[in-house]
Amino acid sequence: MSRKLWEGRFRGKTSRFLEEFTASIKSDARMYREDIEGSIAHVRMLRRQGIITAQDEKKIERGLREIMKEISKGKLDLDPSSEDIHMYVEKVLHEKIGDVAGKLHTARSRNDQVATDLRLHLARAGDDIAGLIEKLQRSIAETAHRNRSVVMPAYTHLQRAQAVLFAHHFLAYHEMLSRDRERFCQTRERILILPLGSAACTGTSFSIDRDFVKRELGFRKITENSVDAVSDRDFALEFLFNCSVLMMHLSRMCEEIVIWTSTEFGFLDLPDELCTGSSIMPQKKNPDMAELVRAKTGRAYGHLISLLTVMKGLPLSYNRDLQEDKEPVFDTIDTVVGSLRAVELMVSGMKLNEEKLSKGLEEGFLTATDLADYLAAKKIPFRKAHEMTGQIVQYSVERGKRLDELTLKELKGFSALIEKDVFLHLSPERSVRNKDVPGGTAPGRVTRRLKKALRKSD
Amino acid sequence: MSRKLWEGRFRGKTSRFLEEFTASIKSDARMYREDIEGSIAHVRMLRRQGIITAQDEKKIERGLREIMKEISKGKLDLDPSSEDIHMYVEKVLHEKIGDVAGKLHTARSRNDQVATDLRLHLARAGDDIAGLIEKLQRSIAETAHRNRSVVMPAYTHLQRAQAVLFAHHFLAYHEMLSRDRERFCQTRERILILPLGSAACTGTSFSIDRDFVKRELGFRKITENSVDAVSDRDFALEFLFNCSVLMMHLSRMCEEIVIWTSTEFGFLDLPDELCTGSSIMPQKKNPDMAELVRAKTGRAYGHLISLLTVMKGLPLSYNRDLQEDKEPVFDTIDTVVGSLRAVELMVSGMKLNEEKLSKGLEEGFLTATDLADYLAAKKIPFRKAHEMTGQIVQYSVERGKRLDELTLKELKGFSALIEKDVFLHLSPERSVRNKDVPGGTAPGRVTRRLKKALRKSD
Amino acid sequence: MSRKLWEGRFRGKTSRFLEEFTASIKSDARMYREDIEGSIAHVRMLRRQGIITAQDEKKIERGLREIMKEISKGKLDLDPSSEDIHMYVEKVLHEKIGDVAGKLHTARSRNDQVATDLRLHLARAGDDIAGLIEKLQRSIAETAHRNRSVVMPAYTHLQRAQAVLFAHHFLAYHEMLSRDRERFCQTRERILILPLGSAACTGTSFSIDRDFVKRELGFRKITENSVDAVSDRDFALEFLFNCSVLMMHLSRMCEEIVIWTSTEFGFLDLPDELCTGSSIMPQKKNPDMAELVRAKTGRAYGHLISLLTVMKGLPLSYNRDLQEDKEPVFDTIDTVVGSLRAVELMVSGMKLNEEKLSKGLEEGFLTATDLADYLAAKKIPFRKAHEMTGQIVQYSVERGKRLDELTLKELKGFSALIEKDVFLHLSPERSVRNKDVPGGTAPGRVTRRLKKALRKSD
Amino acid sequence: MSRKLWEGRFRGKTSRFLEEFTASIKSDARMYREDIEGSIAHVRMLRRQGIITAQDEKKIERGLREIMKEISKGKLDLDPSSEDIHMYVEKVLHEKIGDVAGKLHTARSRNDQVATDLRLHLARAGDDIAGLIEKLQRSIAETAHRNRSVVMPAYTHLQRAQAVLFAHHFLAYHEMLSRDRERFCQTRERILILPLGSAACTGTSFSIDRDFVKRELGFRKITENSVDAVSDRDFALEFLFNCSVLMMHLSRMCEEIVIWTSTEFGFLDLPDELCTGSSIMPQKKNPDMAELVRAKTGRAYGHLISLLTVMKGLPLSYNRDLQEDKEPVFDTIDTVVGSLRAVELMVSGMKLNEEKLSKGLEEGFLTATDLADYLAAKKIPFRKAHEMTGQIVQYSVERGKRLDELTLKELKGFSALIEKDVFLHLSPERSVRNKDVPGGTAPGRVTRRLKKALRKSD
């Protein structure tokens, strides 16, 4: 059985190069567990349906379990001359139990088998990722909680805009990650639809029980069209897209980490263990992990485009092009898992520099909006109030004063409606407290969301 | 009020070029309806909360409704010197009702306003698209039903593989489109989360009622973090991704249409109205629409990458970069809507060439698998059965015979287990009937799915 | 002639939707000048070769020149029912001069015509872009020259690393742009290869003179294979790639502008005219142009992917898919032209804040490398010297001292080899002067490169 | 020296995960040769400049040569705890020759070192690829020559359009590949610009001789700005783009191979060795290699987008993000090299089915254009001639005749200008011969180009 399994018809010999060029075993070997579990479920079903005998099933299952154990212990060398993990497992099984191994492939094809393996693998990877997202969310909530009283500037256009609780700003990432988890969760339902039983592309003439296999493997549904079942990679594309958006979120946080750890901002300090130094500049403490995560976003985007390109304009049903689905997906899994861990380490280890943060509140007229709102509340049309505030800020800039350093007289020069109570709106702390709307930065609101976030991840 | 609304502080004049370069009105004008509806809901809420008077609200709402009517009738020239549709509407409102117009912007910012408009617009576009997908699905089901008895070759690797019902093959696209609809439907829930009330990025100090606005506009939830709310474009990315996968599906069907309308395949004929001729080769009948849809897939992919690129590494909260979300999204909507209509026209108008299709069944040993299955059912291990079938096919090729033209004697030369009943498995029609498993091509199975498909789209 | 030109064979009527869906006139109208110039060169050649009479040529040329004038003056409404600009021009020509207009299309096809038009258009756009790049380079050189004595921190990992001349740092962009120009220049040679004469795909049986047309239109060569000539869009892909890299370079500068104009860095001030304010925060001065250019990078990337997707797996020769080449290319041209102008305005208007920049030199141990080099020059193996410097920096951090505030005694505590001359290496100015290698930041080196840069763009 | 080289300042321990997450040795180990050659050139220069002694240089060079030999013989295990190949080599060198190894890194940084290594590696990979392109071009020319008299249909829109020499059609790929080679050749010049000597980002204070190193390593120029030199990855982007376009070209040929080897077209037969069978359909002969090459185009596109994403918006100078340049580049090299070999095997082994090809000429009115040209040559305006031809074709379709089966009388019914000589234009062979323009398919033209192509690759 060392010949290629489909060599029956061919007279010539498969060239060595073809073997390497077309093989996928290097990458798909990581699905060995799913492949073997799928095969076991398949033969159990074949026995239940009377397609193979109980004795044959036993032999095959025992053989497969041995192989799984041996691979997981590193005892088996993955033979690079095997085309893929499916062929490899079958070959080893044949060496172990002889010709009866040939019954394993009854009523299925590699087309439905590989789709099943990949779906199972992605469902598990998705669960791992969802777990890591949750862990990161907990760290975000804890770090936010640890620094719950810190007020800092909120930025738009990287310009100081208003005063905000650090916890509120940081929980924005918690929100993003909740959406990420929701997406992985919904994609999971579309991943766990069993294609096995579609055979090459039209189904099989054996009287199989697809629902049994579905239950054995933990799938949710079975595919309803065999042609689609062997041609479809939507689930892998969705997975890659979810990973791309997740990496994009992480890249935003990492960009902030890079900016905030600059000497100029100085908002943040990362533990030494998570930074690297320079080979030539010993004083440097570089946020390499943040930079790497930011950059690895490119991988996720690239792999998404890669598979989208593969799928474009592909006629039905199975084409060998589909084999190119695995490497982008696997490398993306590794990238995302590593990045989530890296970011979680940074988040749980980061230390805020409160002095720098509060210094950022002093300059920048962060309460100008509050002043405009104050004026608008006095029934000045908002646009007018806005314009007036602009003039007051301009006046302050020219005199080198902060807004709360202006006298009431100076302020009244702009509008007689301004009263002493205006000063209740010109401090950052007060400004933060005033934003007391759902989703706003008022401490009470943030505390409630923090509680929820901390409870959720218990 | 012809000055830029934020010019208060600036002394210099905004250069003409800056005006054009930074304006988005050319593209965002198409959201005028959503912008005005959002504003009406906002002022109603302001009145309910006592932030503006009933009288002011009335004036503003009446003015806004007038503007909506005038724009929809093409009576208003969109002023290119307006920065965006929001500023334009406010400017015209000011011309109509004077200074009270300035109260419209109380307790909101363009940051939350534009996010609201875009979400509303995308929700509606998504509904339109879902409707068109459903229409296309109905056409697919009808065309499949019209040709329900046609048997044709199923292809893998563009090589004839097995016999299949055309209806079964074609319903594969129905499946893909169901997934597309499901995705749009799930994304809709994440689109319809109201950001209004987040103001610039931290919330507002006015005592607003976000839930009221949510109900008025038909949103499902309100955003829970103001910083995230103005920075988030996940919903637009999801929308673009869903469109990319949908276009990919259409590109696969169009590729098949192009191949099938070639003289060599000749499976399919499109109505003249849907084809174009050549300016130099008058005999040509080109499937241009299929080619164009196939190509337009590139647009969807490109726009997805475009927005992913914009978002990568963007620090919080709002940055002007986010303005670049609109053109990719809008052009994608137009592309998808046009492509769905084009494909629907092709599907409902296509005529199968049954002669050519059935001729494709005669050559190609399409029932070789059935023969292998027959042997396996005789308890020959599948791999062995497979190999044996290979030899029989090779033997037939050499003698220029089809499988069902071999004599029983010839067949028995390969295995004594072969009996007369083997011939029950060697005709394409029988092969199709034998694939009687869930998702398989057996006529009974296909009929049931057809019925469901036709009912569903009623 | 109002019927579609290829309608001879078709009985049915082209549906209205098909007309709109397949038309490209909205986008390709901008090539009217190239289309008409190409036609004039073509008919001149036809006359020279005796294929049409001198009289016919005259009529046609005169008609075409009239059309060009009328379009450029906005006198002609581009008829949306025309399929493309080529058909439109021919239709108007027919209205002007009657049936003789029909001779214009002798010995050519739209396949070679549209490729010719697009190449001519891209060659000109490329020249415009190259001109704008040069202008920007001059502004960079001038701004560098204006600030030639400013020393600032050089950053790696956004951490202060060493001292550098601002001019040296800024000229890095001059280098990038030189590569951009070189690429556009090389692509130009591949753009200006004339496909006209390839007709539909195999050439023409008329005895045409392709070299004459080449010279008339300013092409450099003629294509050597007609099948390739009508199928090839490499030149457009190259153009899009060059634009993508150029936009990437601009995005890097814009990122620096955004970071440098933050209050925390404060290195840079942009003129008011180039900034926008906030509708709700009057004190803000946002670097919107920099943000928009940064974001528009996404467009260029997206359009590149779009056309790459179109071309993937397209069989020869001409396919209608190729029509989808134009919008990505045209929008990219507009994006790049606008972005180059925007960046040029920012560069020529930017003002450095020398106080902030020099303050950045004081902290951060920017001369640590110089200290390590000093030690290495004393024959301490570099790695050892590096480690030793690390310890000295650590010592300084703990004592809150700068390197040049350590005493010789303290320094000698780390190595007896350290002498008084060490202080000659610990000031930023000295450090800059010491980097006196080709490509280094020493003032003499920079001055020479500045001179060259200023001369070059004269 | 087992501690990280930059650990001097840090008190904590680099976590194990950080080590793995930030390490690049798995991918950059393949540059070991370039790294060591670069180091040897560097130390020779250091000695020539008197920065290190001749004795030290000798020791270091001897050590480095030993390491190179050992790695190339597989004797050294690449230590995964080393950060990258540079650190690994230095560590092993230290084990071999002791502290003097520390002098190797004098006057350079990893920032300029890694850029140098990558450039050298890409220059070599580019040369390999150019060589393989040339080999493929020779195979194309030979296959075209071998089948030089075969006439076949030329396709537009995958519809038969005109008659063409197979050799002419196939040489279109020769043209594409010539452009590919030209691009690699031009990129080579921009790759071979030496960044070494730029150190971390501002240059070095040692008196180095960059031109000497340039000559030693075969670079063409030295970089002119140290900040740019360590930040620039344009050369890698160009390389990835060239590979993307090359893969796109191959994908087009592979698409044609897939279509042409379908039973319906049947134009082409590939050697058995280059095809695979089906595990369940023994009669199948699948063009897997063509499918895989077509699909692998996605990898090249994806890796291009990946690096473009990394570079977008990155501030100067070196950032750790740049480390993510290597994997996309290396995987692209492997993909392109394998794909070129695979396509070359298919091209040199393909066999045309002349019967099928010439049958394709009989139907389809491939000489309709010739008829239109014939009429136009009779001074009927081309558009009129075109319309008339359309009517003649329609007439023939209705009577089930080919154009050359019409009688002169029937033809004269359409125009009295038609004479007996019209039949000289209605056979495919004659049509091919008539396309006697530069770039056209006339046999004489094709023969000349073939000769040139065969000579060129000698």
Image (cartoon, coloured by chain):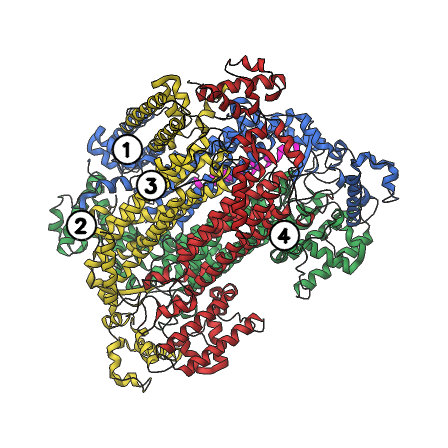
Chain colours: A green, B blue, C yellow, D red
- Does residue C253 appear in this view? yes
Q: CA distance from mark 3 to mark 1?
A: 36 Å
Say whether residue D360 is left or right of residue A271: right
Q: Position of residue B113 (x, y in %)?
A: 33, 40
- Per the image, label 1 sits on a secondary structure element best described as helix
Tags 3 and 1 touching, CB below 8 Å: no
Residue type of the residue flagged with mark 2: Val
Q: Chain of mark 3?
A: C
Asked if the magenta segment contains residue B146, the reply would be: no
Tags 2 and 4 touching, CB below 8 Å: no
Asked if the magenta segment contains residue B187, the reply would be: yes
Q: CA distance from mark 4 to mark 1?
A: 60 Å
Tags 2 and 3 touching, CB below 8 Å: no
**Segment tinted magenta in the rendering:** B167-191
Residue type of the residue flagged with mark 3: Ala
Q: Residue A22 shows which numbered tag?
A: 4
The number of numbered badges drawn on the structure is 4
- Position of residue A348 relative to residue A227, above or below, is below
- The residue where tag 1 is placed is B89
- The residue where tag 2 is placed is A393
Q: CA distance from mark 2 to mark 3?
A: 45 Å
Identify the residue at horizontal 28%, vertical 25% (top origin): C70
Snapshot quadrant of residue D380: top left
- The residue where tag 3 is placed is C125
Snapshot quadrant of residue B458: top right
Residue type of the residue flagged with mark 4: Thr
Q: Chain of mark 1?
A: B
Say whether residue A31 is left or right of residue C228: right
- Front label number (2 vs 3): 3
Q: Position of residue B412 (x, y in %)?
A: 87, 42
- Does residue A343 appear in this view? no
